[in-house]
Amino acid sequence: MRDQLAAALKDAMKSKNAERLSTVRLIQAAIKDRDIANRGVGKAEASDDEILQLLAKMVKQREESAKIYEENQRPELAAKERAEILVIQEFLPKQLSQSEVRSNIAEIIAETGASGAKDMGKVMAVLKERFAGRMDFSKASATVKELLG
């Protein structure tokens, strides 16, 4: 993942694509921050799964910002946020559809033997381990709650 980002940074520099370059630098800065935070608690540098979770979080932050900018009649800032989202999404794996999310959740519920709301954390932990960066966990948690309820 880090090699892919380094290559994207070089390509953006060569093609003089300023928007892409700044977004890739933002991603690398966020990863470096995570590495530093991990170092403080004695962990290794961020794994690919952690990087995928970080990228998904960055996309979500930008979607929220774009929405706020649109509500406040700032379409140029919203467009900038959406452009960053497109660059970040290039590094994320293909997102699962709602039906795929639902079937995977049902499978994990059966696998873990989860039976009620008290087992929701167990199911979410397995989902985050297996599908980092491939599903929106806030939406998935609502589906887990529904299927366990």
Image (tube, helix red, strand yellow):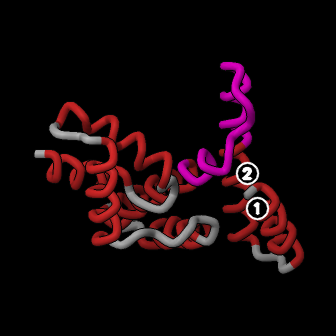
Q: Amino acid at mark 2?
A: Gln
Q: Say if 27 sits above or below 99 in the image.
A: above
Of the image marks 2 and 1, the number of the one nearer the N terminus: 1
The picture places residue 77, in percent across and down from the top left corner, at: 49, 66
Q: Secondary structure at mark 1?
A: helix
What is the quadrant of residue 120 in the picture?
top left
The residue where tag 2 is placed is 28
Which residue does the image show at 35% across and 58% down from the upper left?
Answer: 68
Q: Secondary structure at mark 2?
A: helix
Front residue (pair 15, 79) = 15
Residue 87 appears left or right of 130: right
Quadrant occupied by the C terminus: top left
Q: Which mark is residue 63?
A: none
- Range covered by the magenta-colored residues: 32-53
The picture places residue 52, in percent across and down from the top left corner, at: 58, 54
Q: Are marks 2 and 1 in contact (CB under 8 Å)?
A: yes
Which residue does the image show at 48% across and 62% down from the upper left?
Answer: 134
The picture places residue 11, in percent across and down from the top left corner, at: 84, 74
Tell us which disc is closer to us: 2 or 1: 1
Which residue does the image show at 25% across and 35% down from the upper left?
Answer: 119
As for residue 108 lying within the magenta part, the answer is no
Which residue does the image show at 37% across and 51% down from the upper left?
Answer: 137
The residue where tag 1 is placed is 5
Q: Say if 126 sits above or below 136 in the image.
A: above
As for residue 33 lying within the magenta part, the answer is yes
Mark 2 vs mark 1, CA separation in Å: 7 Å
Residue 11 appears left or right of 133: right
